[in-house]
Image (tube, rainbow, N blue to C red):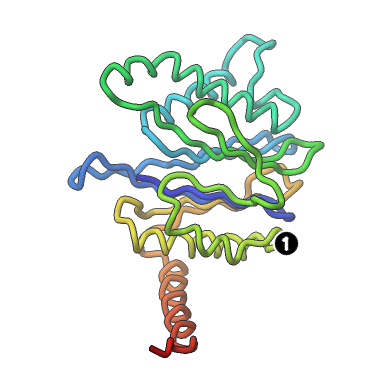
Amino acid sequence: MTYCVALKLERGLVFAADTRTNAGIDNISTFSKLHSWEQDGERVMVLLSAGNLAITQAIISQLEQHQRSDNLDSATIFNVQSMFQAARVVGDAVRQVYAIDGKALEARGESFTASLIFGGQIKGESPRLFHIYAEGNFIEATDDTAFFQIGEHKYGKPILDRVARADMRLGEAAKLLLVSFDSTLRSNLSVGMPVDLLAYQADNLRITRKKRIEQDDEYFKDLSDGWSVALREAFDNLPELEI
């Protein structure tokens, strides 16, 4: 299973993804589900992926193959003029992979599972964030819905609903996403460390804050312990129900 989350802020975008994939309790591997591209001073794009690993890797390969294509008339995430157009390119890549693999999967009784979070900034417009579905269509983050989650999202959602704000600092938002991950890791063993984290500052147009947080990361351990203590103290301070 997977957990990926991204948050759109006034100051930029923050992305986080776990790295665990498994085909059974005795077959666990680590693969990055956070992918990024940049043209320094021109554009930054980040993709989080959940679902069938072979499908999501094929989608990534399709996008990067477009970059190497000699067809200058073909729209790619590297030459379109807006993030909306780039999201359309990603959606088209999803459909292209389905056209190749979808029928074969269905013939074996398997579904075409892919869910993506795609965000970034192209020079001349503000950072934008999209949730792209297995059908290739997508929705965009708004002021009312400023974060997206894919994969095993239910355990990490309550803290986001209560705390996420558009005016958060990037480091503050990164802390929030890691608390959301801590809740998920405690409740679902199919989501596992390490966690890939990327914070993008608006108008920087380059990636400067990217980190892999390992199991023994001191900050994450302190954050997890501190959150547990704070929750217990908050619970103890609530009035008891008189019954």
User: In the image, residue 171 lies at what x, y percent?
Assistant: 62, 63
Task: Give 211 or 54, whichever is nearer the viewer.
Answer: 54
Q: In terms of secondary structure, where does tag 1 sit?
A: loop
Task: Work out whether 86 lies above or below 222.
Answer: above
- Taking the spot 44% from the left edge, 88% from the top edge, the residue there is 240
Q: Quadrant of residue 214?
A: bottom left
Image quarter hosting the N terminus: top left
CA neighbours of label 1 inside 10 A, class few (<14), some (14 to 19), many (20+): few
User: In the image, residue 108 lies at what x, y percent?
Assistant: 26, 20
Residue at which label 1 appears? 167
User: In the image, residue 120 lies at what x, y percent?
Assistant: 66, 40
Task: Give 80 or 215, whichever is nearer the viewer.
Answer: 80
- Taking the spot 45% from the left edge, 19% from the top edge, the residue there is 97
Task: Give 66 or 242, whichever is nearer the viewer.
Answer: 242
User: In the image, residue 59 lies at what x, y percent?
Assistant: 48, 26
- Taking the spot 70% from the left edge, 31% from the top edge, the residue there is 84
* Amino acid, disc 1: Asp
Q: Quadrant of residue 70?
A: top right
